[in-house]
Image (cartoon, rainbow, N blue to C red):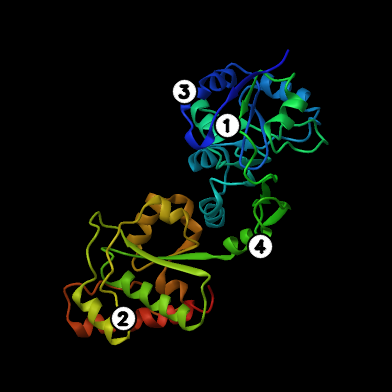
Amino acid sequence: MSAKIITVNPEKLEEKNIHAAVEIIKSGGLVIVPTETVYGVCANANDAKAIERLYAVKQRPRNKPFSLLIDAEEQAEALAEGLSPKVYRIMDKFWPGPLTIILKAKKGGTLGLRMPADPVALALARLSGVPLACPSANISGQEPPVDFNQALAQLGNAVDLAIDAGPTQHKLESTIADLTGDEVVIAREGAIKKSEIEFAAKRKQVLFVCTGNSCRSVMAEGLLQKKLKDSNRDDVDVISAGILLIGGLSASEGTKEVMKNAGIDVSRHRSQQINKEMLLRSDLILVMEKVHEKEVLRAAPEAKNRVFLLKEFAKIRDDDLEVHDPLGHSLDYYEDIFYIIKEAVERISGVI
């Protein structure tokens, strides 16, 4: 029996046009769907019978798992464990897009995840409300289909519905990056070059945290940015934030003054509060006081091994490892705090 065919325009997609495909997925059926790389065949990954049928249709060995299409990073957090800043950095850079990433699964083993850029595939994943097992729409060992007719010729008589959206954008399979270890391993180079992924993986993000993000963290951020620039380094992003709810404030006048004397203009700085997203994406979180560390870990317990007192990380020998708040104090006190932070920044710039 031939599959029912739906023709859509991916550039002017109306979601009502793929409701039939959504219902088939929910009922355990199989759907041929376009992606920006090749055509795929999708099934509800949570439906064991649908997955068994998918294996049979593909004539695929049972020991070769299917990668999953998802529509949001939150699904990756729900399905995988140990998401490092490197993983978030790569997801932020290449998703939605033609990249499948292999991660450690919460249920054990590994799994492959991809957030497609193709509007049809992305909408199908979102409207179905489940991860979609979605290998290429071909018999295992055959060439992956890059247009609808190729997919229909191979699997048209074995699925319930097929969505025709014309030829795919890249006409090339997704790149597969294994992110389960410390190093990125490219299992398959496809639409995204290996060098692009490796470059993104090597970048780091350093976050400085103080109370209001108007004094100490601003000094540290500006000093490290200048140090990295003077060293011709562009592989580290430096940001700062505070633990207070107030945001959008400028740097304090004392901070502006001591930073100006150091040749650094912070007049455009606007304060922001820490949030879980920035904490999960930071490779190194340097705080000024223990209370800041406590608030960071309350917001993101996963950051436990990446948060340090600034003086502690810089290995500054001092009975008092906290950098105290200069707000409300004299300019001389601001300068004292500035030089403490400057010494710490100079030390850590050589190890990040």
Q: Which of marks 4 and 3 is in front?
A: 3
Classify residue 317 as left or right of residue 133: left
Amino acid bearing label 1? Pro
Establish if 131 lies above or below 259.
Answer: above
Question: For residue 54, what is the image quadrant?
Answer: top right
Which residue was labeled with disc 2? 338
Estimate the spatial distance between the alpha carbons at disc 2 and disc 1, rounded to whole Å.
50 Å
Locate residue 268, reporting x and y percent: 27, 70
**Label 2 Cα crowd, 10 Å radius (few <14 / some 14-19 / many 20+):** many
Classify residue 246 as left or right of residue 103: left
Sequence-first disc among 4 and 2 = 4
Estimate the spatial distance between the alpha carbons at disc 4 and disc 3, rounded to whole Å.
40 Å
Query: Under tag 3, what secondary structure?
Result: helix
Sequence-first disc among 2 and 1 = 1
Q: Nearer the viewer, mark 1 or mark 4?
A: 4
Q: Which residue is drawn at 68% across and 39% down?
A: 38
Estimate the spatial distance between the alpha carbons at disc 2 and disc 3, rounded to whole Å.
59 Å
Locate residue 241, reporting x and y percent: 33, 62
